Image (spheres, rainbow, N blue to C red):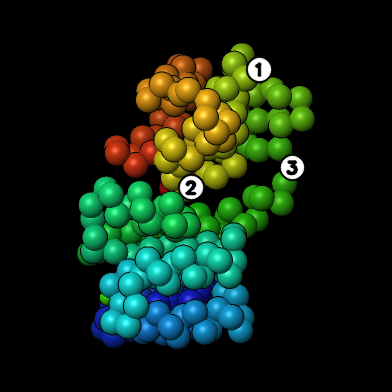
Amino acid sequence: MQILLVEDDSDLAQALTQTLKHEGFAVNHVSRGQQAIDVIKIELPDIVILDLGLPDMDGMDVLQTIRKQSADLPILVLTARTSVEDKVNGLDLGADDYLAKPFDVAELMARLRVFSRRASTQKHSGLIIGDVKLDDKSHQVFISGEEVDLSRREFMVLKALMENAGRVQTRESLESKLYSWGEEVASNTIEVHIHHLRKKLPDKFIQTLRGIGYIIKTINE
Ligand code: CA
């Protein structure tokens, strides 16, 4: 796994590079947004770790530019901007995950392992996370082999969350997957579907990130 680390704090960058290498990742480090964009034009890494506070460009612009270059390159954003609004903005602009500074290195490693696992689980057909199996073709969901009854929209919410396991789904993004443009949607519709799903699924299978959205974490996190 090759990581592009975009971080202008040289002490932090050095420490992270060392830890990441120790964990078996290949690391390329740049300290400017423009450098990151240039590097990605030449060769796509497997994961980008992007600090939003960069000296030459706004990290959000870097994020957008990288996202245009590659739609599914995993991008983990490091940010001291902790407001919910910034987080939602970043997710809309295409970040896959967030870590607020100061962060725990163990936490960063856990997130990166999710990225690597996601890359390998996406190759399987059907979605299996923990005891839950979702069969897209037959529209069936099983918990430990027992079928559970879900409404069409509950199924769609669960599918969206499972397909993006380890990644936060905002209420808006879930709504956009369930409803067409212009369709009247009550503001608590997604909450209601999630509430019903939770009654049918294992405890804590779907987690709420308050003010941001929902996430299904892959196992071993
Ligand atoms: Ca910085």
Are the residues tagged 3 and 2 within 8 Å (C-beta)? no
Amino acid type at circle 2 is Gly
Q: Residues within 10 Å of mark 1 (few under 14, many from 20)?
A: few
Question: How many labels were placed on the picture?
Answer: 3
Q: Say whether disc 1 or disc 3 marks the residue closer to the N-terminus.
A: 3
Q: Is mark 2 on a helix, strand or loop?
A: loop
Q: Where is mark 3, residue-wise?
A: 125
Q: What residue type is labelled 1?
A: Glu
In percent of width and height, residue 123 lies at 71, 51
Which of the two discs, 2 and 1, labels the residue nearer the N terminus?
1
What x and y, as percent, mark residue 137?
Answer: 77, 30
Whole-number angstrom distance, CA of label 3 to CA of label 2: 18 Å
Residue that label 2 marks: 166
- Which badge, 3 or 2, is on the more N-terminal residue? 3
Residue pictured at 48% horizontal, 40% vertical: 173
Q: In which quarter of the image is ligand 1?
A: bottom left
Rendered image quadrant of residue 31: bottom left
Callout 2: 10 Å neighbours few (<14), some, many (20+)? many
Image quadrant occupied by the N terminus: bottom right
* Closest to the observer, 102 or 56: 56
Looking at the rendering, which quadrant does residue 108 occupy?
Answer: bottom left
From the viewer's perspective, tell me whether residue 168 is left or right of residue 85: right
Q: Determine whether the residue tagged by mark 3 lies in a helix, strand or loop.
A: loop
In whole angstroms, how far apart are the C-alphas of marks 1 and 3? 18 Å
Q: Do the residues labelled 1 and 3 touch (CB within 8 Å)?
A: no
Kindly report the distance in space between the C-alpha atoms of the residues bearing marks 2 and 1.
24 Å
**In the depicted structure, whether residue 158 falls above or below residue 42:** above
| Image vertical order of residue 53 relative to residue 192, above or below | below
